[in-house]
Image (spheres, rainbow, N blue to C red):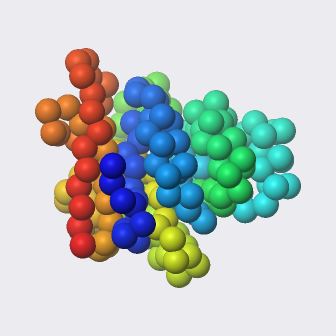
Amino acid sequence: MTDYKFFSFIFIGDTHGFLDDFKKQKEIIEQVKPDFVLSEQLQDKILDSEQKYNNIIRTKFISDMTKFEEVKDLILLCQKLKIKLIGMDLFNFGFDTRMQEIVNGLKQATKEDEKLFESILKKRQDKHKDVISKYQKLSDKPIIIILGSWHLRDDSEIIKKLNNYLVVYPCKDGELILEPTSGKIDYCEKIKK
């Protein structure tokens, strides 16, 4: 079993629903008992009080791009363990209605849309870095960061810029899984000191 306490950051790859991501998230959160869990799926929501937890559970609304059911288990776990759950992305991931339709396969992207996607991705990555930097200063414990697996590629800006982290990611034959796949799925680990 990995000793998590020696890392500043523990990244957990999220498949956005095509695997049971929560099982691995729960295992690590319960072992680490961090002060903060940062989550891409929570977007701009900050759950740092019992009242905020109760409000989001009552309204059951995250955004047009993330359904409450997708993050319900994570919210309930962090509430129970009294861990602050921090969204680390833009509301609706920065996508307006047209972009949401493209992401959801309802419209075809134009060349201009593709440029806009790149611009939005840059803003999202900047937001990720800003939130990580802010919360790193607020805790002596490792910070758990739940990000889409795509953001955990070796050439990802976050992965290249930070140090002293562990990445736990869904894999098949040692390769990072980025899309639905069949067969045996494992979780691999990658360390950077």
Between 91 and 54, the one nearer to me in the picture: 54
Closer to the camera in the image, 77 or 52: 77
Tell me how many marks there are.
0
- 156 left or right, relative to 97: left
**Residue 66's image quarter?**
top right
Residue 162, placed above or below residue 73 = below
Name the residue at 24% across, 61% down. Answer: 191
Residue plotted at (20% across, 32% down)? 172
Q: Say whether residue 127 is visible.
A: no
| Residue 69 place in picture, x, y as percent | 64, 30
Residue 16 in which image quadrant: top left
Front residue of this view, candidates 168 and 96 = 168
Q: Position of residue 173 (x, y in %)?
A: 14, 33
Q: Work out whether 153 lies above or below 61.
A: below
Q: Indicate the position of residue 109 as horizontal and vertical percent values.
A: 36, 37
Instruction: Report if residue 141 is visible in the image.
Output: yes
- Residue located at (37% from left, 30% from top): 108
In front here: 134 or 34?
A: 34
Above or below for 64 versus 9: above
Name the spot of residue 166 as percent of width and height, x first.
Answer: 32, 60
- In the picture, which quadrant includes the C terminus? bottom left
**Horizontal side, residue 123 vs residue 159: left or right:** right
* Residue at the outermost top position: 182
Classify residue 175 by image quadrant. top left
153 versus 123 height, above or below: above
